[in-house]
Amino acid sequence: MKARTWTLLFIIVGVLCAAVFYWPWWLPFEEVAKSAARYGCPLCPCIVSIGSPASKFLRRVLVFGSIDAITCMTIGWLVLGVVRLLIRRVSN
């Protein structure tokens, strides 16, 4: 795969992860709050609760999806780099 394809894939995965996490109609709020507290999230959904559920969802996905996309892209490229180095060492 080309580098652009990998990068786009990592970005999509990061945004989708945020969308699944902040989807207000997916799980009851208590379960979402428990999972956020389990990871020590300082910006729990119960703190910022201004607006309709749809606007809160879009805002959180845009902001936290961007952060997740950057994280996913960084980790993904690190893993790909390590795998490529290992393949080169084994083939030599």
Image (cartoon, grey):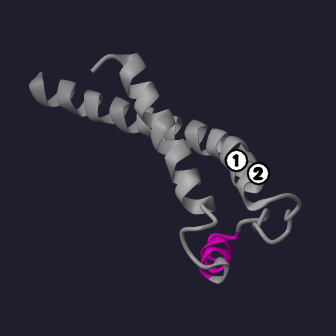
Residue sitting nearer the eye, 54 or 13: 54
The disc label shown at residue 13, or none: none
Residue marked by disc 2: 55
Residue sitting nearer the eye, 79 or 7: 7
Q: Which image quarter holds the N terminus? A: top left
What residue is rendered at 52% in x and 36% in y? 74
- Horizontal and vertical percent position of residue 9: 41, 32
Q: CA distance from mark 2 to mark 1?
A: 5 Å
Which residues fall within the magenta stretch? 31-40
Residue marked by disc 1: 58
The residue at the far right in this view is 50
Determine if the magenta segment contains residue 32: yes
Q: Quadrant of residue 5?
A: top left
**Mark 1 neighbour density, 10 Å: few (under 14) some (14–19) many (20 or more):** some
Q: Secondary structure at mark 2?
A: helix
Up/down of 46 relative to 58, above or below: below
Residue type indicated by callout 1: Leu
- Horizontal and vertical percent position of residue 11: 51, 34
**Mark 2 neighbour density, 10 Å: few (under 14) some (14–19) many (20 or more):** few
Asked if the residue at tag 1 contacts the one at tag 2, i.e. Cβ–Cβ closer than 8 Å, the answer is: yes
Magenta stretch, main secondary structure class: helix
Up/down of 66 relative to 4, above or below: below
Number of callouts in the render?
2
What residue is rendered at 76% in x and 55% in y? 56
Residue type indicated by callout 2: Ser
Q: Is residue 52 left or right of residue 15?
A: right
Q: Secondary structure at mark 1?
A: helix
The residue at the far left in this view is 91
